[in-house]
Image (spheres, rainbow, N blue to C red):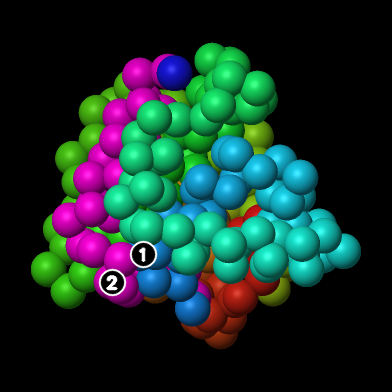
Amino acid sequence: MSTHAKRERLLLADLLEAEGPDAPTLCEGWKTRDLAAHVVVRERRPDAAGGILIKQLAPRLDRVMEEFTGKPYEELLQLIRTGPPRFSPFALKQIDEMSNVVEFYVHAEDVRRAQPDWTPRELDPVFQDALWSRLERTARLTGRGAPTGLVLRRPDGQTAVAHRGAPVVTVTGEPSELLMFALGRQREAKVELEGDPDAIAKVREAKELGL
């Protein structure tokens, strides 16, 4: 596994262990047990994981999720830590790097930021660049449902257009925070928004952001 993906995987597992199975997360309707089951199903049950994005497959995903949420919590954490089985596409280093860095970073923050005493993490520039690279590639996908034009901007001025339209709202922050915003965690993202006040209010409350 890649360095970033492995680090975020282990951090997520540690956070899930520390908070226990019934702690809140930023994922609506999910406690930590549900989030742990989601991570395991995504990696180990490709026959069901398609339901995450494809509505027609959602009933099967729901059945498999129910099965995995019923497993001992410690077993789920061990499965997260050990990583995907050899037959999983996620066992390939390039796919792991491409797919899991964002997945594990965001879900680790879903656990951290749902707790009342959370504080921002200090992330190294190399990791921020890695997150920005992935955000650039997916910005239009995550922003396709934005109610206004939407531009994501790093503090150094680099931008990614998430949605074309008018008026335009520009969201400025570190790549890690822009990711949280673009993936539907607007309230918890440490960013600054510029633009028409009504447009900003719509973007802050939009439920259509994310995958």
Q: Secondary structure at mark 1?
A: helix
> Marks 1 and 2, how far apart in space?
5 Å
Given the image, on which type of amino acid does mark 2 rest?
Ala
N-terminal label among 1 and 2: 2
Q: Quadrant of residue 123?
A: top left
- Helix, strand or loop at mark 2: loop
63 lies above or below 176: below
- Which residue is disc 2 drawn over? 23
Residue 147 at x, y percent in the picture: 69, 73
**Residue marked by disc 1:** 32
Q: Please state, as top left, top right, bottom left or bottom right, where the C terminus lies in the image.
A: bottom right
Residue 92 location in percent, x, y? 59, 16
Placement of the N terminus among the 4 image quadrants: top left
Left or right of 72? Residue 100 is right
In this figure, what is the number of numbered marks?
Answer: 2
The answer to if 114 sits in the magenta stretch is: no
Which of the two residues, 118 or 11, is positioned nearer the viewer here? Answer: 11
- Residue drawn at the location 51% of the way across and 23% of the way down: 97
Q: Nearer the viewer, residue 152 or 130?
A: 130
Local crowd at mark 2 within 10 Å, few (<14), some, or many (≥20)?
Answer: some
Residue at point 58%, 49% (across, down): 41
User: What is the quadrant of residue 82 in the picture?
Assistant: top left
User: Which residue type does callout 1 highlight?
Assistant: Thr
Cβ–Cβ under 8 Å for marks 1 and 2? yes
Indicate the quadrant where residue 6 lies: top left
- Please report the bounds of the magenta region as a residue range: 2-28
Q: Is residue 3 above or below residue 74?
A: above
Q: Nearer the viewer, residue 28 or 47?
A: 47
Residue at x 17% of width, y 56% of height: 18
For mark 1, does the 10 Å Cα neighbourhood hold few (<14), some (14 to 19), or many (20 or more) residues?
A: many
Answer yes or no: is residue 23 visible.
yes
